[in-house]
């Protein structure tokens, strides 16, 4: 089960089981609602709405209602070396550094939202993937441990 957070969601997102991710704009950081709205969320992570509450606030940037909601962080799909990809294992994450930007799996190695050194727990092993550099890689679902 991922980290649960109370946050604000848009009118469109304010439905149970809606999955969303955020993009923080510079003007959002100056907003008085930033701390409750996006302050506890991370760009690139996906979140699932568990519960929408009746309380709402007007977002001064989009000029529409934002609803208070309980959300849960979703697992991240990323590429790991086959020897490290063991279901249920907790480990310190190390990003794969790669210049093969045309590789279909590049984003799973380099552009995922998990930071170097963060602790993760490996969930499902999804599939083996080809690597142009010859590494033996596996796509996995992983949960960030907070």
Image (cartoon, rainbow, N blue to C red):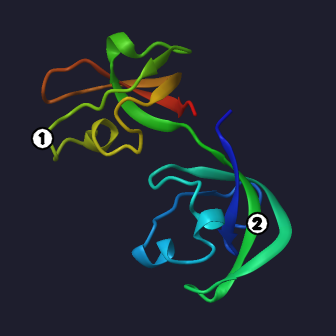
Q: Is residue 119 left or right of residue 136?
A: right
Q: Are marks 2 and 1 in contact (CB under 8 Å)?
A: no
**Distance from the alpha carbon under mark 2 to that under mark 1:** 41 Å
The x, y position of residue 14, in whole percent, is 73, 67
Vertical placement of 46 versus 63: above or below? above
The x, y position of residue 10, in whole percent, is 66, 73
For image coordinates 50% across by 52% down, the residue present is 42
Count of numbered circles on the image = 2
Q: Is residue 103 left or right of residue 28?
A: left
The x, y position of residue 65, in whole percent, is 71, 81
Front residue of this view, candidates 43 and 34: 34
The x, y position of residue 15, in whole percent, is 75, 63
Query: Residue 132, located in which quarter of the rendered image?
Result: top left
Mark identifier at residue 142: none
Q: Quadrant of the C terminus?
A: top right
Vertical placement of 52 versus 121: above or below? below
Q: Select label 2 or label 1 by which is in front.
A: 2
Which residue lies under the disc numbered 1? 99
Mark identifier at residue 68: 2
The residue positioned farthest toward the bottom in the image shown: 63
Judge whether residue 12 can be spotted in this image: yes
For image coordinates 31% across by 46% down, the residue present is 111
Judge whether residue 124 can be spotted in this image: no
For image coordinates 50% across by 75% down, the residue present is 28
Q: Secondary structure at mark 1?
A: loop
Crowding at label 1, few (<14), some or many (≥20) Cα neighbours within 10 Å? few
Vertical placement of 1 versus 74: above or below? above
């Amino acid at each position: 089960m991922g980290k649960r957070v109370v946050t604000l969601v848009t009118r469109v997102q304010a439905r149970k089981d809606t999955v969303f991710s955020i993009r923080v704009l510079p003007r959002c950081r100056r907003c008085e609602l930033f701390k409750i709205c996006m302050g506890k969320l991370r760009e690139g992570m996906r979140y699932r709405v568990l519960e929408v509450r009746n309380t709402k606030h007007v977002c001064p940037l989009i000029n529409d209602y934002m609803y208070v909601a309980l959300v849960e962080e979703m697992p991240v799909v990323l590429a790991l070396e086959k020897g490290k990809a063991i279901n249920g294992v907790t480990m310190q994450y190390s990003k794969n550094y790669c210049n093969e930007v045309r590789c279909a799996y590049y984003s799973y190695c380099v552009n995922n939202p998990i930071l170097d050194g963060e602790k993760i727990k490996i969930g499902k092993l999804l599939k083996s993937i080809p690597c142009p550099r010859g590494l033996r890689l596996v796509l996995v679902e992983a949960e960030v441990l907070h």
